[in-house]
Image: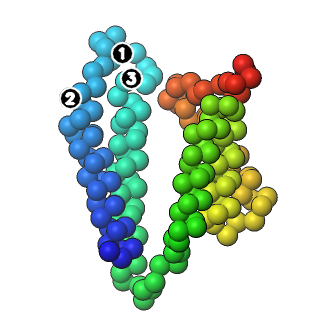
Amino acid sequence: MNIRKLRFSAGLWAAAVGVVLIVWLIPDYISVPPAAKFTPGPTPRTFPAVLAWVLIVSGIASLVIDLLARSSAQTEPAYRLDWKTALIITGLTVLYVVLFHWIGFTATTVIVLFGFLSLLSPMRLLPAVGVSLVVTLIIVLLFSTLLQIPLPASFPALGF
C-alpha cells in the first residue's frame, strides 16, 4: 500500500470514527448529571466531544491533503520512514511512559516532543526547544483552564 492510499484510508477512518462518536456513542453512553446540564462549564461529554471533533477535522484535512496531492505532479512522498527511525520513535514513546512517572507530564512532554521534533523535522536546536515548550504550555493551559482537567504533578517521584 502506498503512502497516498494509506493517508486517504486513515483520513476516512478518522473522520468516520469522529462522526460515530459525536452522533451515537457520546450521546448514548456518556450520561450528564441533571445538575450539570444547567451549570456553565464542561460536562462529562466535553472532553470526548473535543477529541471526536479533532478526529473529524484531522480526517477531513488528511482527505483534502490527499486530494490536493493527487492533482499535483508530486509522485514520491517527501519523507520515508526507515527501521532506525521507527525504532527511535518506539524508544521515545517508551521513554515517555517511563519518565512520566518520575518527572511528571510537563517535563516529560517537553523532552519527548523535543526528541520527536529533532528526529522528524529539519528544525534547528533552539527552535525545536521553543516549539516543545510552547506546545507543552498550550496543552497544560488547555487542560487546566478550558477543560478543567488537572494534569499530574510536576515531579511526582520527588513528592511535588
State left or right for residue 125 relative to residue 142. Answer: right
Amino acid type assigned to the residue bearing label 3 in the image: Thr
Q: CA distance from mark 1 to mark 2?
A: 17 Å
Outermost residue to the top: 35
Hey, which quadrant is residue 104 in on the image?
Answer: top right
In percent of the image, x 67 and y 70: which residue is there? 122
In percent of the image, x 29 and y 12: which residue is there? 34
Asked if the residues shown at circle 1 and circle 3 are in contact, with their CB atoms under 8 angstroms apart, the answer is yes
Percent across and percent down for residue 19 are 26, 47
First in sequence: mark 1 vs mark 3: 1
First in sequence: mark 1 vs mark 2: 2
Q: Secondary structure at mark 3?
A: loop
Q: Secondary structure at mark 2?
A: helix
Q: Which mark is residue 36?
A: 1
Q: Nearer the viewer, mark 3 or mark 2?
A: 2
Q: Is residue 102 above or below residue 85?
A: above
Percent across and percent down for residue 61 are 40, 62
In percent of the image, x 60 and y 59: which residue is there? 88
83 or 142: nearer the viewer: 83
Q: Is any atom of residue 64 visible in this view?
A: no
Hey, which quadrant is residue 23 in on the image?
Answer: top left
Residue hosting label 2: 28
